[in-house]
């Protein structure tokens, strides 16, 4: 013969249901996860996203100052999610350093300067590289031995160099700068054509 549960027993069931969440038991319940402990000397925690955003801007700069490098190190070391996040930040920096070595404009990688200038001012990248190769052999320190004074990646005459920068609205830049030679040439190609260059590639 079946009996209905007493009122006291039913109340006890209700109490248990309210204390233990559905699908869990008191034996398996775990405390909520807490934030990782910050590294010694860190007064603030940062996210991986903050680190990546700053690192990307930093590695695109022409020059990285000591202050910026120290701030990047702080963003890496003081990750709010512990050692895993620190390792992830280090990997991001290695990838960005590799990208910088391959594509960033420097005196030793003048083709990157020409690529960046072509993107900025338009024109034909292949033509601009060929012209620089025929004018200077892609040497930003080339100087015409014949006495004309033509200098740099695109062999600008000093007077033409100063006049071009003035027209571009730019203050004085070294005539040996691969970046600014590439920019000035790309700007002149777009605005003045190719008539001032006589090299085979121009």
Image (tube, helix red, strand yellow):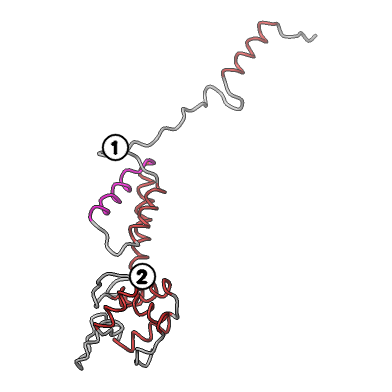
Residue ID at (35%, 65%): 98
Residue ID at (27%, 62%): 63
Would you place residue 13 above or below residue 127 in this image?
Answer: above
Which SS class for mark 1?
Answer: loop
Tell me the CA gap for discs 1 and 2: 36 Å
Quarter of the image that includes the C terminus:
bottom left
Residue to which mark 2 is pinned: 102
Quarter of the image that includes the N terminus:
top right
| Residue count near mark 1 (Cα–Cα under 10 Å), binned few <14, some 14–19, many ≥20 | few
Residue ID at (24%, 78%): 175
Residue ID at (32%, 43%): 78
- Asked if residue 9 is among those painted magenta in the image, a careful observer would answer no
- Looking at the rendering, the stretch of residues picked out in magenta corresponds to 66-81
Snapshot quadrant of residue 24 = top right
Earlier in the chain: of badge 1 and badge 2, it is 1
Q: Depth check: give the residue in front, 152 or 51.
A: 152
* Disc 1 to disc 2: CB gap under 8 Å: no
Residue 9 appears left or right of 46: right
Give the farthest residue toward the right. 1
Residue to which mark 1 is pinned: 43
- Asked if residue 70 is among those painted magenta in the image, a careful observer would answer yes
Would you place residue 108 above or below residue 54 in this image?
Answer: below
Q: What secondary structure is the stretch in magenta mostly built from?
A: helix
Would you place residue 63 above or below residue 153 in this image?
Answer: above
Snapshot quadrant of residue 158 = bottom left
Q: Give the x, y percent position of residue 29.
A: 51, 26
| Residue count near mark 2 (Cα–Cα under 10 Å), binned few <14, some 14–19, many ≥20 | few
Q: Give the x, y percent position of residue 7.
A: 69, 6
Which SS class for mark 2?
Answer: helix
């Amino acid at each position: 013969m079946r009996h209905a549960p007493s009122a006291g027993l039913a109340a006890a069931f209700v109490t248990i249901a309210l204390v233990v969440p559905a699908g869990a038991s008191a034996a398996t319940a775990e405390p909520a996860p807490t934030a990782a402990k910050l590294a010694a000397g860190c007064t603030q925690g940062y996210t991986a996203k903050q680190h990546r955003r700053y690192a990307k801007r930093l590695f695109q700069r022409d020059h990285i100052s000591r202050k910026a490098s120290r701030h990047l190190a702080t963003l890496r070391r003081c990750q709010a999610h512990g050692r895993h996040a620190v390792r992830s930040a280090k990997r991001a920096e290695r990838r960005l350093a590799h990208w910088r070595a391959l594509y960033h404009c420097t005196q030793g990688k003048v083709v990157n300067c020409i690529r960046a200038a072509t993107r900025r001012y338009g024109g034909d990248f292949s033509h601009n590289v060929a012209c620089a190769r025929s004018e200077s052999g892609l040497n930003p320190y080339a100087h015409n031995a014949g006495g004309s004074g033509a200098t740099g990646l695109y062999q600008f005459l000093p007077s033409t160099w100063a006049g071009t920068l003035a027209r571009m609205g730019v203050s004085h830049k070294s005539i040996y700068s691969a970046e600014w030679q590439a920019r000035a040439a790309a700007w002149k190609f777009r605005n003045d054509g190719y008539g001032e260059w006589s090299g085979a590639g121009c």
